[in-house]
Image: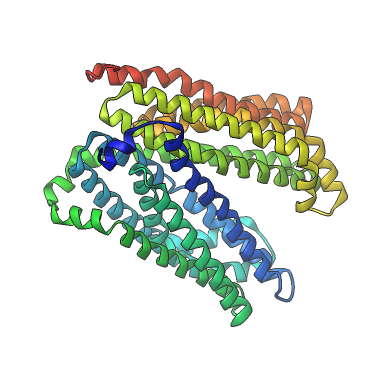
Amino acid sequence: MTRAARDLEVNHRRIWLLAGPIILSNVSVPLVGAVDTAVVGHLPGPEAIGAVALGALIFSFLYWGFGFLRMGTTGFVARAYGAGDWQLLADTLLRVMILALGLGVLTIALGWPLTDFALYLLDSSAEVESLAADYAHIRIWSAPAVLCVYAFTGVFIGLHDTRSAFVLQLVLNLVNVALDLLFVLGFGWGVDGVALASVIAEYVALGLGIYLLRFRLRQAFAGFERARLLDRAALALLFTANANIFVRTLCLLFAFSYFTAMGAKQGEVILAANAILMHLQSFVAHGLDGFAHAVEALAGSAYGAGRRDRFRRAVRLTSLWGVGVALLAGAVYAVFGEAIVGLFTSIDAVADAALVYLPWMIVAPLVSVWSFQLDGIFIGTGHTREMRNAMLVSLAAYLAFVEWSLPALGNHGLFLGLMAFMLFRAASLLFYFRGIELAMRTRGETAR
């Protein structure tokens, strides 16, 4: 049996081979931010910590908007892989690389005025803004590498090679941490050293990604045909899918920004407590994303191969494991939640407030896992228009719900609104879900 044939098999072992490296990779991401904060925390005064925090926030928002390069690429590659269309796979690889490099250069060109405007909106002290601007003006040079790494990660997941995606992220993080320590604690370069460490680490990851994909890239360039690569229909499909995911991502970003803004209106203590609890939600999301990525690869490949039986099995088994891990996460928060909150803050008022609303984080994993899984299914099968429409409807319902629940129930109403948003997303995607199987049937694909 060939590797491609083995990859199309759907079983519990296959799911963990796909999900496990992604979960480990995701868990490593927050550690880099912690090291960034820790190294500048040893510098005199709090300004450096604030500057790195503001700078990192700007780039988190900026690069999160380009998440379609990862998600869209996974779907295209997985479907081509499942169909055994190696030429389409090669062309997709080249197209997304060109797109990532082009967007990266454009980001550098527009980056300075954009980051300066963002710092103006954040309105911090003059010293913090000055240091954050220095950080941003260095960090912006990493854009082409960051976006290519996004695309490479999407390629690896689509090829069912999540181990390479893990290695890529792990090397990026380790280089970043090592250079943080060297540049800041060793050379005393301060905030500039943190930014430079990130830039170098991203380009190291870019080089590693090219090395790991060297055989695919060699095949792609060997069969290069300009006319086929620039085919209008193919480019339009790529653009449309990425635009749909981009709109979906902006809606998601707005929803969480709105949650933060509504928490801020309730005072500093509630704002801080909500921030801690959203870190708990973030950890859960990073973990459950492993199964969402697994279903992207498995369902996308099954869809491309026209195997409805494997598609259904991929959906069922990844969802089963996702729900199991969600229940485990909820149980951990129920038992150890107070201790976990204590790791985030020693301020009694903030900790007490966080514990009041901790029950929402206990139920959050089981509530949110469904929307994560469905997102993965729709991305893998390329039904991005429906995913975009579902998100638009969910966002409108969420905003309307919070307008009622927040005045009526206070901060409990805000968390109730967040849980409702997750359920709105799942329900609206389920409305479109049958269309995926119908699309397979109309293409003449029958269950076996």
Classify the position of the C terminus by image quarter: top left
Q: Percent x, y for residue 393?
A: 51, 25
Q: Give the mark count.
A: 0
Residue 276 relative to residue 58: left or right: right
- Tell me the residue at 47%/53% (across/down): 63
Residue 273 vs residue 4: left or right?
right
Is any part of residue 80 visible from this angle? yes
Q: Nearer the viewer, residue 209 or 47?
A: 209
User: In the current view of this chain or complex, which residue is farthest to the right?
Assistant: 348
Q: Residue at x 49, y 36 (%)?
A: 291
Q: Is residue 90 above or below residue 431?
A: below
Q: Nearer the viewer, residue 67 or 300?
A: 300
Query: Residue shown at 65%/24% (left/top)?
Result: 401
Residue 40: percent from left, percent from top: 66, 70
Farthest residue, direction bottom: 187
In the image, is residue 226 above or below residue 440?
A: below
The quadrant of the image that shows the N terminus is: top left
- Estimate the x, y position of residue 101 in percent, counting from the top left: 32, 58
Q: Is residue 238 above or below residue 111?
A: above
Rendered location of residue 365, percent (x, y): 63, 33
